[in-house]
Amino acid sequence: MTLLDVDFDFHYTSGAGVVCRWEDPVGDPRVTVFLGASGSGKTTVLRCLAGLERPQRGHIRFGDHVWVDAARRIHLRPDQRDVGVLFQEYALFPHLTVAQNIAFGARHMPRAAVAARVGELVDTFRLQGLEARRPGQLSGGQQQRVALARAVFRRPKLLLLDEPLSAVDRPTGDELREELRLLIRALAIPAYVVSHDRVDALTLADRTVLIDHGRVIQSGTTEEVFDHPATPAAARLVGVDTILLGRIAAVDDGLARIVVAGQEVCAQAPTDEGHEAALLIRAEDVALARHDVTDSSVMNRWRATIVAHAAEGPFVRVALDCGFRLSALVTRDAWHRLALAPGDRAWAIVKAASIRALPRN
Amino acid sequence: MDWAAVGLTLKLAALTTLVLAMVGLPLAYWLATSTRRWRPLVDAAVAVPLLLPPTVLGFYFLMSTGPNTPLGRLYAQLFDGTLPFSFTGILVASVLYNLPFAVRPFASGFAAVDRRLIEAARCLGASGPRTFLTVVLPLSWPSVLAGLVLAFAHTVGEFGVVLMVGGNIPGVTRTIALAIYDDVQALDYAAANEASALLLAFAVAVLGVTYSLQRRTLAV
């Protein structure tokens, strides 16, 4: 059973465009992230799904519904597709109040029903007391919640979110991302999220679609895509440093022990015990030692086998197998001093503070 | 003061403005949002009266609507009359001549509305007219009002087109601007002075209104 079956070309008159082909199976209400650099065409893909652009060739099917069939000249309008769209920077109507923004999609509904639905959404999205405010008087997080409430007013079958976190700086972004993650889960509507930030894919997405230069270059579960990027372009998008997915075994005083492929990783706790977490480790934060260093402050010491190495300017990039794959970046001097070769055993050392731990699903 | 001319001028200006609101608003919205290839052509056609001497427009209007032309015969069949030298004639000519003065401010106001808001409205199921009335117009009304005020004022002061198309028939097509011309021809400077002062005061008032509207537009 297919949720979304996509195979289309779309080109602007300027020549830029996208070529898309992928299928998403039906699952639980699920989140898919379109990951791509800026200018890669990912927003254009979303606009085609929303019905704001007309593909010149191919089809888009959502379940049994045909949204686009270029050969049969079928192009459903945005409002015929049952989708809720969250626009970049939210596109709230500045001249309308929060309540009027949320109820904008109301059509052929008795006044009382509209008021009841608005009240319900105000509760779900924690907007109590803000109903009469205008968007200009809201914080970024509140604007995001109003925009989501407006998008789901008509109970859409699918949510489309365009760079939901691009408008804010990073600390605020982390907070909003967490809130967005919980809201999307609570809504239980399948969602497609456009993003240039792999952190969004790692925290929000069950499935990831990689888009590069107007083409879908890979799609699959987030684990598949991040563990096995199919091409060098895909590898660049998901990042060359280490990304680990694991389960939080214990949390003690804000510090978590996270189990990854049988190894234990110590990092700041991103969420509670028993939940999934994604760990980002930059290669330059990984040190190597021939022998175990027991008298230092470092919390993470893993037995590792050298898999490969390659010169990178004054540095050497070393691929390690610690039960999971780990990439280390050390100076050429240090590499020669250690006199290590592929197949040798060594210790990989990472401070807990330099691991970025994120909550997942 | 020739009060008949004053009344006729106000009637002409009010009706011209009304017709421009009905025709010009949809036309301007189309110009501001369309991506059709021939949109620039229509845009240019609307702007032609800005550069054309009013007498030229009036001349072609007479040539194409006279009683022996196809348009003239059609009009005679439908309404039993002629367009040249009638009030309807100067109204139609005045609408054509004032099109850019209304449509350009409208269109620039509409174009300044964030496209994403229009798309958001469409995705939320609003039709084109509903989007226009509930999103575009509330966000661009100072430009719309400025366009209407300009068109009204410009019609009040019109001379060439009205003279060419309407002649100078008291009570039918004789506006204040024409009355002033007649007064001067008749060496009645006192009457010309009175009417001229009235138009000058009116022009200053209109400029004050449009400038304050523009400030308001910038402030939004």
Image (cartoon, rainbow, N blue to C red):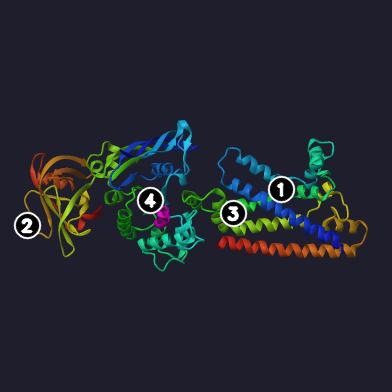
Asked if the stretch drawn in magenta spans residue A151, the answer is yes
Amino acid on which disc 3 is placed: Gly
Q: Are marks 3 and 1 on the same chain?
A: yes
Q: CA distance from mark 4 to mark 1?
A: 44 Å
Few, some or many residues within 10 Å of mark 3 (<14, 14–19, 20+): many
**Circle 3 sits on which residue?**
B109
Residue A146 seen in this snapshot:
yes
Helix, strand or loop under label 4: loop
Q: Report the chain holding disc 2.
A: A
Q: Quadrant of residue B48?
A: top right
**Circle 1 sits on which residue?**
B50
Residue bounds of the magenta highlight: A147-162
Q: CA distance from mark 3 to mark 2?
A: 70 Å
In which quadrant will I find the N terminus of chain A? Answer: top left
In x, y percent, where is residue A119? 41, 63
Helix, strand or loop under label 1: helix
Q: Report the chain holding disc 1.
A: B
**Circle 2 sits on which residue?**
A294
